[in-house]
Amino acid sequence: MGKDAVLLVEGNDDLHVISGLLKYHQFPQVFEIKEQGGIDNLLQTVPVQIKGSNIRAIGLVVDADLNLTARWQSLRAVLRAAGYEIPDAPVAGGLVIAAENLPAIGVWLMPDNSLPGMLEGTPTRAAVLRIDAWG
């Protein structure tokens, strides 16, 4: 697609919810949305995307599911290994950070970065995504 920003989402439902929100709110899609086929695939894809030569920003939208802390720790481990300084706990409203010589990273745990759950279960809450902060 030639876009230098990418939003990685866990599954097809996440892709459709986010695409629908962007369309409804008439947000210009200046990034590519890539469905990853589950959290394990997403976690494996993140280092590859970080090393992408023309990627300037990467967003990660994942479901907190039943254990928000465990999900955060798995994301944190992958991002720390890539060279990012990631806080010990999720940040209210999502995390957007920049690191020298690395793409900007945005991380959102659905439904709201503080509760267990998933994007598809609470689409109205997803409308507060700070996609514009990194895109």
Image: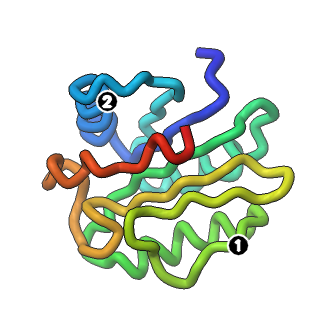
Q: Nearer the viewer, residue 52 or 92?
A: 92
Q: Residue 128 location, x and y as percent? A: 29, 51
Displayed quadrant of residue 71: bottom left
Q: Nearer the viewer, residue 76 or 113?
A: 113
Q: Residue furthest top?
A: 1
Q: Is residue 49 left or right of residue 60?
A: right
Q: Residue 119 location, x and y as percent? A: 24, 52
Which type of secondary structure does the marked residue at label 1 adopt? Answer: loop
Up-down relation of residue 40 to residue 66 (above or below): above
Residue at the location (15% across, 54% down)? 122
Q: Residue 113 location, x and y as percent? A: 35, 68
Q: Nearer the viewer, residue 87 or 41?
A: 87
Q: What kind of residue is marked 2?
A: Leu
Q: What kind of residue is marked 1?
A: Glu
Residue at numbered disc 1? 85
Q: Is residue 42 left or right of residue 50?
A: left
Residue at the location (49% across, 58% down)? 107
Q: CA distance from mark 2 to mark 1?
A: 29 Å
Displayed quadrant of residue 27: top left
Q: Are marks 2 and 1 in contact (CB under 8 Å)?
A: no
Q: Is residue 24 left or right of residue 80?
A: left
Q: What numbered label is drawn on residue 63?
A: none
2 or 1: tag closer to the N-terminus: 2
Which type of secondary structure does the marked residue at label 2 adopt? Answer: helix
Q: What numbered label is drawn on residue 22?
A: 2
Residue at the location (30% across, 23% down)? 26
Residue at the location (43% across, 56% down)? 39
- How many discs mark residues in the rendered view? 2
- Tell me the quarter of the image containing the C terminus: top right
